[in-house]
Image (cartoon, helix red, strand yellow):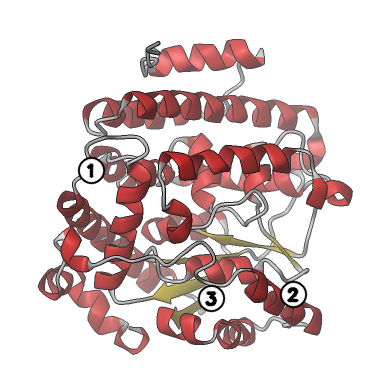
Amino acid sequence: MAINAPELHAEQLIETAERRTGLDSWGDESFRSGLEHLIAALRTQARLSQVGRIVAYFNLLDLLCVRLRLNHYRSERAAVAEQEIHQPLFILGLPRTGTTILHELIAQDPSFRSPASWEVARPLPPPVAAAYTNDKRIASIDRLLGLQEKLAPGFQAIHALGARLPQECVYLLASSFRSEQFGYMYNIPAYRSWALDEDMSSAYDWHARFLQHLQVDTPRERWVLKTPAHLGYLKFLLARYPDASIVWTHRRPLQAIASFSSLACTLRSGFSDHIDPVATGACELQHFSEVTRRGMADRDKLDRGQFVDVSFEAICADPMSVIAGIYDRLGLELSHEARLCMHAYLRRRPRDLYGEHRYSADVFGLDSGGEKQAFGQYLGQYADFL
């Protein structure tokens, strides 16, 4: 029996979220313009399949409910707003440049706090330290994440998913409706271009509120956070977190964009029957060249010595040496306990745990000439790390 996919309408989704939660306090109203631009792009560009439209509908509805519930909890518990986010460490760079493994390894340090996938997806009530590793929400989120591999076979070999794994900031930002999460999942260049030109202050304010909520009952010394997308919004990130430290990972853009194009095609195939690898490669090359240009410009203006540059090749060759260098550069102590935890993690999760990710730049219409044209300044300025 055929199932009618629900229509995507911003006001209807908002009304449904209010009925479902019994709440109506949205906080900063800027989320509405993000939701409207996102839905417009989903309807006109994403070419969603019936399954894709169903997934998009319930994903947006869930994010709206999360936003309402977080605002309500915050209004009921003063301790949330009193939380301080102290000297967070952000890992960013082009996608597919080693940000994930650095994030996962540093998250093993007992002095750091990272947002796990399960608590970002289901943040109410806030996680409690005593039950953090066996919270009942973990199993349900693992089952939910398992559907991703069924929708997009092979995705786990490109980017591992798991309820306990550290989650990217795009998922915290998603309930502000200014987030690259949607650009990863769907072919929506109009939304991504709109977001790049937006004032992201409200999105990073929401990001901080989300962290305050997550840490209220499970504090650590500092957060370690990650998403490549921060590169395009450094001025907003550093305005919200002026004491942040930044690790910028580097890799030849040709390889990074080819790898990400493979990821994007695989992921989007779960939501659309119209996947064009060459068009994807061209779009991602243009998008991330602009992201990189903005990141370089912001860094030139704002860097007060809190940036650390590392190369993808070095991460692949010896991640522990790279981490030791990061800690040394930032004046952090890499304790014996942290080293043991990181080494144990590497043994448990080897690089090709779910299979080898095979891809070719040619498949996506990418070549060194296009790389040089799009990333010439970056190639020259960061040659020592490429």
Whether residue 217 is visible here, answered yes or no, is: no
Q: Is residue 157 above or below residue 203?
A: below
The amino acid type, in three-letter code, at marker 3 is Gln
Q: Which residue is mark 2?
A: 341
Q: Quadrant of the C terminus?
A: bottom left
Q: Identify residue type, mark 2.
A: Cys
Q: In the rendering, at what x and y percent does residue 220 appear?
A: 78, 61
Of labels 1 and 3, earlier in sequence is 1
User: What residue do we see at 64% from left, 43% from top?
Assistant: 142
Residue at 17% x, 55% y is 282
Nearer the N terminus, badge 1 or badge 2? 1
The tag on residue 69 is none
> Is mark 2 in CB contact (under 8 Å) with mark 3?
no
**Image quadrant in which you'd find residue 206:** top right
The secondary element bearing badge 1 is classed as: loop
From mark 1 to mark 3, how far is it between C-alphas? 40 Å
Whole-percent x, y for residue 350 in the image:
57, 72
Residue at (68%, 44%) from the top-left corner? 119
Say which label, 2 or 3, has the lower sequence index.
Answer: 3
Q: Which residue is mark 1?
A: 275
Q: Which residue is mark 3?
A: 306
The quadrant in which residue 240 appears is bottom right
Q: Is residue 23 above or below residue 297?
A: above
Which circle, 1 or 3, is nearer the viewer? 1
Identify which residue is drawn at 74% across, 29% down.
Answer: 73
| Closer to the camera in the image, 91 or 49 | 49
In-image side of 319 versus 212 (left or right): left
Foreground tag (2 vs 3): 2
| Contact check, label 1 and label 3, Cβ < 8 Å | no
Is 67 situated left or right of 30 in this image?
A: right
Few, some or many residues within 10 Å of mark 1 (<14, 14–19, 20+):
some
